[in-house]
Image (spheres, grey):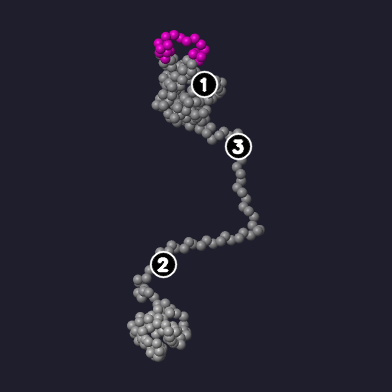
Amino acid sequence: MTCRYCGAQISDSQSRCTRCQRRLDFGLGGGRAMAAQYVATAAAPETAEDPSSAARARFLVKEGGAPVRSSAPVQPPLFTVASHVVSLDQYLPPPAPRRRAPAPRSRAARPAAPPQQAAFDFDAPPPGAHEFAAAQLRMPVASPARRAFAFLVDLSFVLVGFSLFLALVRGILGYWPAGAAFYEGLGACLWLLASIYHFLHAAVGRRTPGQYAAGLILVTREGRHGEPLHRVKRVLSNTVPVVSLMGAAWAAITEEHLTFADLITGTYLTTADGR
């Protein structure tokens, strides 16, 4: 027999379907067979097609297929008014102009001759030498005698300060220690005091009393007034005893009368009346 709910084949002695577990209410015999026969021969209900769904559908496929298109499909424009459409060409930058490729050179063309090389003058002075020579004509280098006079005047001021320092040391210690190390230390103190004396004048950009007395001014090799930076450089270079002593000897024996500090800093001392 056949289950009327799911259509499964079951035996006549079963009261429940083995597939859907439905209870079979009909009695055993022809009643159940008649019910199954009724269900099997019943006609399936037909549903009417909704006309609104057919109207909403964009594509309808009929039985037998649609006729073959004779032309390519064309998408209709989204905007019917042309003034409402903004083209991308209005926002894109203009294309760069194309450069024409250079014409190939013929093998027969000869390369251009290089310009004539200027002759070298190995005996010519350096570029800065002309400026220094012109400045020396207007402002000659101070003579060693004037420099020595300015040095003695400045040394007298340094010795006065050093004497006060010695009196202070004598008052603190109460005696003079005997030994070479003590006197070497005093010599180093004298050199340091002289360096501080010149450094204070250079830092404020003023001449020392010895330079005022000798009428000396500091100028550059181009003939400009020396700046405080130039004065500080001269003091730092003269702080080294070897540079200071050997530079003084070099200025005494050479024709230019330039010390090592003058050559290092690019400045020199001249007389005030030479301007």
Give neighbour class at mark 2: few <14, some 14-19, many 20+ (Cα, 10 Å).
few
List the residue tagged with mark 1.
Answer: 241
CA separation in Å, label 1 and label 3: 39 Å
Say which element carries label 3. Answer: loop
Image coords of residue 102 (percent x, y): 57, 60
Residue occupying image coordinates x 52% and y 28%:
263
Residue type at numbered disc 3 = Asp
CA separation in Å, label 1 and label 2: 81 Å
Residue type at numbered disc 1 = Pro
Relative to 89, say whether 213 is above or below.
above
Highlighted range, magenta: 165-184
Relative to 168, say whether 270 is above or below.
below
CA separation in Å, label 3 and label 2: 67 Å
Residue occupying image coordinates x 36% and y 76%:
80
List the residue tagged with mark 3.
Answer: 121
- Can residue 267 be seen here? The reply is yes
Quadrant of the rendering where the N terminus is positioned: bottom left
Relative to 133, say whether 151 is above or below.
above
Q: Which mark is residue 88?
A: 2
Image coords of residue 219 (percent x, y): 46, 28
In magenta segment, residue 173: yes
Indicate which disc, 1 or 2, sits on the residue closer to the N terminus.
2
Which image quadrant is residue 60 in? bottom left
Residue occupying image coordinates x 35% and y 72%:
83
Counting labels gives 3
Residue sitting farthest toward the right: 108
